[in-house]
Amino acid sequence: MKPPPLWEVFPELVATAMGRVKADFVVQNATLIDVYSGELIEGVNVAIKRGRIASVSRVGSVAGGEVLEADGAYLAPGFLDGHVHVESSMLTPTGFAKAVLPRGTTGVFMDPHEIANVLGVEGVKLIIEESKRLPLRFFVLIPSCVPASTPELETSGAGVSVKDVEELLKLDEVVGLAEVMNYPGVLAGDNKLHGEIQASLRAGKVVDGHCIGLSDLELSAYVASGISSCHESTGLDEALGKVRLGMYVMAREGSAWRDLAEVLKVVTRMKVDPRRVILVTDDRSPKDLLTEGHVDFLVRRAIEEGVDPVTAIQMVTLNTAERFKVDGDLGGIAPGRYADLVLLRGLERVEVDTVIVNGEVVSRGGKLLVEL
């Protein structure tokens, strides 16, 4: 469910900002969490037209239809999970959306390698088709290692070939190639794996990584292939080495692996520029989704580890959007962007009150307001 493209709708956004036409929806008197400048700005009004933001202003409110009075509450961009396997939640995309939308998550970048190992390309397409009708935005990365090992070690239900990758890359919902787990294959020149990476780079899309314990030269070789992120760092030194080579480091706090505290020391101890750090879940059990939360939990954990609250929110919004090359539409509250917003009653506690997607309220007070 996407708003119209910007090229089509921008004349209406301009007219709305200039007061010639009414906004569809206005959030009034919010404290803006500006992830671009790192500021908290009080008394901000956000006007929305056709699912996109028309204006962000402190000067005066734009006339509109529905008005949401924020009463000074914090207004953040919709939260993004930069690496997740939805199948690990034991939920369908619809069930997953029901669980995470009230938590402030409005988009996920998912690697459907579990379903691909069983159904191959058809499984990836099934995920995409179901997600199209949901308010939660699903961005798909193509599983790079299907089957995950050799036929001698694993009986897989399907495979994903270079040709399959090339075809899937043509889909709008696909943003890149998922975690390249076979890092020995990258270093050794495996033809199939190199072909998948080449196809993704040729299409102008990203390649996600998965590498553990590589030496300096091995890591350089891995990064030289065009792989530009990794969620497998478990400690400070490993994370720091990747940031220094230009990778996005994904600090993971899921149900199986909890590395966030150690990885975030690159920011809290080493004072590295946090713009290359992203918070991700990787996997999340139904129990943890219900009791701890989703991306809101990641932000709380980062704040507990000493990360500035605005910086922590950057790590699940702008940083993520920039990494996946979708920051023209997502990741911040600015004119022209999708109107995906989260109203927070408490900043450090990340108390999600209201969730807005495409300029429509989808959740309030932890209750989903739309039928899925």
Image (tube, rainbow, N blue to C red):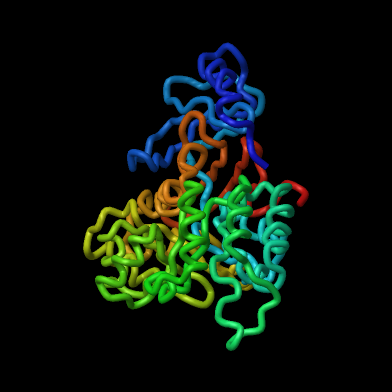
What is the quadrant of residue 284 in the picture? Answer: bottom right
- Picture residue at 29% right of the left edge, 60% below the top: 243
User: Residue reaching furthest bottom?
Assistant: 152
Q: Find residue 52 and report its horizontal and vertical position in percent.
A: 57, 31
Q: Residue furthest left?
A: 270
Residue located at (59% from left, 45% from top): 354
Question: Residue extending furthest right?
Answer: 371
Q: Residue at x 53, y 25 (%)?
A: 54
Horizontal and vertical percent position of residue 272:
25, 58
Instruction: From the viewer's perspective, tell me whether residue 60 is left or right of residue 368.
Output: left
Q: Note whether residue 31 is visible.
A: yes
- How many callouts does the rendering have? 0
Q: Residue 314 or 70: which is nearer the viewer?
A: 314
Q: Nearer the viewer, residue 91 or 292?
A: 91
Residue 346 showing in the rendered view: no
Q: Is 92 rendered above or below residue 370?
A: below
Identify whether 221 is placed above or below 54: below
